[in-house]
Image (spheres, rainbow, N blue to C red):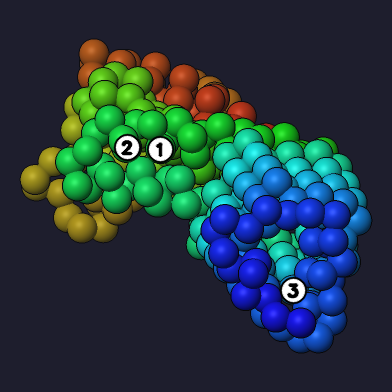
Amino acid sequence: MSKDKFLNSDYKPDENTKQEIESLHKEGVSLSGVQLQYADMKNVKLVNADLSNANLTRADFSGASLYGVNLEGANLFKASFEGANLKAANMKYCNFLGVDFSGAKLNNVDWGEEHKIINEIEAEEANAAGDKQTAIEKYKEAEDVYRNLKINLQSQTLGEDVGKVFLREMITKRKQLPLFSPLRIASKIAYLTTGYGEKIGNIIYTVIGTIVSCAFLYGIEGVSYGNKLLKFEGTQSFTEMVNIFGDLFYFSVVVFSTVGFGEILPIGPIGKTLMIFEGLIGGLILAILIIAVYKHLMDR
C-alpha cells in the first residue's frame, strides 16, 4: 500500500482512512507529511509512528494509542486528543492552537527546548523583523496555548512541566506589553529575581545578592552597634573592614529575615530607608522561596 494519496493536500479522509493509516504503520512506512485534516482517527493504534510535519487540522484522535509518536512540526490546529495516550511523544514545533488535550496522558512529552512552542518562536521572528502587530498576535496565541497546556498538565499533577509552561505563559504575557511600561519592567524584574516563583536558584541568588548589597550600603552611612559605629572609612585596615562587613552582613540578615533583634540600629535617613526596604523585600522573597520549595517537594 502506498501513502502517496495521503500526501495530497486535497485528500479527503473517508471511513477507510484509519484502517489504511494503521496498515501503513504496521508495514513500517513513515507517515511523515500525511494530510489527515478532519479525519476520524478515534482509538487508532499508532505507537511510535512518525507523523512529523503531518496536517492533523481538526482531526479526531480521541482515545488513540500514540505512545512515543513523533509529531514534530505537525499542524494540530483544533485537533482532539481527548483521552489519548501521548506518553513520550515528540511534540516539538507543533501548532497547538485550539487542541483538546483533556484526559490525554502527557507524561514525558518532549515539548521542545525550554517548552517553547512554535507560536512563540514565530512571534520572536516577527518581532526581530520589525513586524510588531504580527508579533503581538503570535504572543497572544502562545499565551492561550500555554494556558491550555498548563490546565491539562495540572490535572495530571505533572508539576515540573506545569512550572515550565507557566514560566513561558508569563514571558509571552510580558512581551505583549509596551517595551518600557512599568508593568513590563516589573514583570522582567520578577522574572530575573524569582523566575515568577518557579526558579529556586534565581530566588536564592536574589536573597544572597540583596543581603550582601544592603550590608555594603549600610556601611556607607554607618549603623550604631552599642558604643561603636560600624562604617567603612578610608583609614581602616583590610582586617578591620572585613570585621565591620561581617557585623553589617549579620545585621543585613537579621533585617532581611525580619527577625529584628535590635542591638544594631541605623542612625541616618539612608540606613532607615534601606532597612524598611530590605525588611519588606525580605518578607516577600522568603515567602516566595518557601512556596517554590514546597511546590518542588510536592512534585516529587
The residue drawn where x is 65% and y is 39% is: 78
Q: Circle 3 sits on which residue?
A: 49
The residue drawn where x is 32% and y is 37% is: 135
The residue drawn where x is 34% and y is 31% is: 136
Question: Which one is nearer the viewer's eye here, 157 or 265?
Answer: 157
Q: Circle 2 sits on which residue?
A: 135
Q: Circle 1 sits on which residue?
A: 138
- In the figure, 252 relative to 241: above or below? above
Residue 175 in the image, given as x and y percentages of width and height: 35, 34
Q: Can the viewer see residue 289 in this picture? A: no
Residue 240 in the image, given as x and y percentages of width and height: 25, 51
Name the element at disc 1. helix
N-terminal of the pair, mark 2 or mark 3, is 3
Front disc: 1 or 3: 3
Location of residue 252 (image quadrant): top left
- In the figure, 76 relative to 166: above or below? below
Q: Residue type at mark 3?
A: Ala
Residue 285 in the image, given as x and y percentages of width and height: 52, 32
The residue drawn where x is 53% and y is 42% is: 167
